[in-house]
Image (cartoon, grey):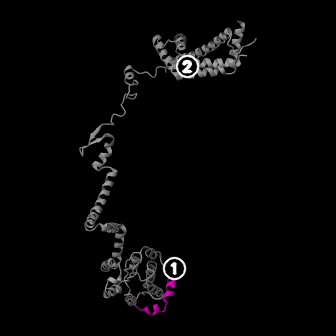
Amino acid sequence: MKMEDMPLSGPDNTKLEALVHDIYSELVEDACLGLCFEVHRAVKQGYFFLDETDQESMKEFEIVDQPGVDIFGQVYNQWKNKECECPNCKRLIAASRFAPHLEKCLGMGRNSSRIANRRLASNNNMSKSESDQEDNDDLNDNDWSYGAEKKARKRKSDKNQNSPRRSKSIKHKNGELGSSVSSEPYKYNYNTGISYETLGPDEVRSLLTTQCGVISEHTKKMCTRPSLPDADTVVESDSFDIPDGQTLMSRLQWEDSPDISPADSASSKASTNHSDSRRPKKKKRPSLGLNSGGGGSLTGGGGSSSSSSQSNISLSTKKKRPKLSAPSISSIYDDLN
Amino acid sequence: MSKESRMRATINQKLTEMGERERLKELLRAKLTECGWKDQMKAHCKEVIKEKGFEHVTVEDLVVEITPKGRALVPDSVKKELLHRIRAFLAQHAT
């Protein structure tokens, strides 16, 4: 038997076509039968009609197919263009912005208090500096830079005044020194922040007999550690050479550091001024306080000769206890003047 | 005639043996479901069942009602594709 491929000859072709169609019909009938069996089983098992409820619900939840509306019949941008009246400020606000607006308007949101505080702070600053600026502008246009500087400096001073550090230091100092001494150093601090030249010799002497008086190069402030009454160490301090003394001093001070008790070291790290203020009370190791004071002055303003004299004194203090001699210091400063 | 019938028998045998028949069946089912023919037919079944009372409906009832409508409702695209595939198979294997 010979089978033919797909020739275009008449009768065979039709036969083939007929065959093809027959096969197709068979396949379709098969599909229909499969469906019938499926449905019949569903009916007999009772799950064929499960997606149907009563007529009312069927109509209610019918699929909607209108333009501008979703299949549930809802309009999705219904509230887009609506405006609401704010009960507080009586303004018309867009619906999508209504909630945030209310938050700010009533002052009840998380951000609104933050913004209000910020505004208050900036208003205070602005009111202070605005008056300065106005004065400067009236005087001279060239002072514009000066005005800005003044503004900046003023702002900075404001910042420093309000910072917790400053208040802490004030408390610290007051607690340790006592009121009388503390009020004085602050007065002098601000004045002598510039130089000793502004003060008269008598003032300087009186100042330096009561306090240390070393000006730190970093902060331009005077060391307000109260000077100690013992003047016996003048003899010993003279025995040391000044240039060698300095290097020796630094070496010795570094060696000394392990001797310092933890409490002392912590205080000396904090601030030389304030750690020194503690020294007079403690009788155990005032030398350490002097060392730290000397060290502070060394690190702060190594350039001045006062530091070397200080270091000499602190070296000698290892042997004797209270070492700072007021007359020696005042003599040094007299030389400077 | 016998040639033809033999030819038919051979081809059918080949279709089945080579798994082409099954493949064609699956293809057809998928296509019919895709185009919505199945849902249409199911809706028609519901009507028939409601008509006949669903307690006593038999497979035969359904078959009699459904098959002619089913044949008619097959979309042309599906039909053409199937025919094409059958012809291709025959061209390949009818030697």
Which of A163/A8 is in front?
A: A8
- Residue A254 falls within the magenta-colored stretch: yes
Q: How far apart are marks 2 and 1 (CA)?
A: 98 Å
Residue A193 quadrant = bottom left
Which of A160/A322 is in front?
A: A160
Q: What stretch is highlighted in magenta?
A: A230-256
Give, as a three-letter code, the residue at label 2: Ser
**Furthest residue to the bottom?**
A235
Quarter the C terminus of chain A occupies: bottom left
Q: Position of residue A321 (x, y in %)?
A: 44, 87
Residue B77 numbered tag:
2
Q: Which residue is drawn at 47% across and 17% down?
A: B43
Q: Residue at x 37, y 33 (%)?
A: A76
Q: Where is residue A196 in the image (x, y as percent from the top left)?
A: 35, 83
* Rendered view: A38 above or below A311: above
From this viewpoint, is residue A284 visible?
A: no
Number of numbered discs: 2
Q: Is mark 1 on a helix, strand or loop?
A: helix
Residue A210 quadrant = bottom left
Q: Position of residue A232 (x, y in %)?
A: 42, 92
Q: Which residue is drawn at 49% across and 90% down?
A: A241
Q: Mark 1 points at which residue?
A: A254
Q: Which is closer to the viewer, label 2 or label 1?
A: 2
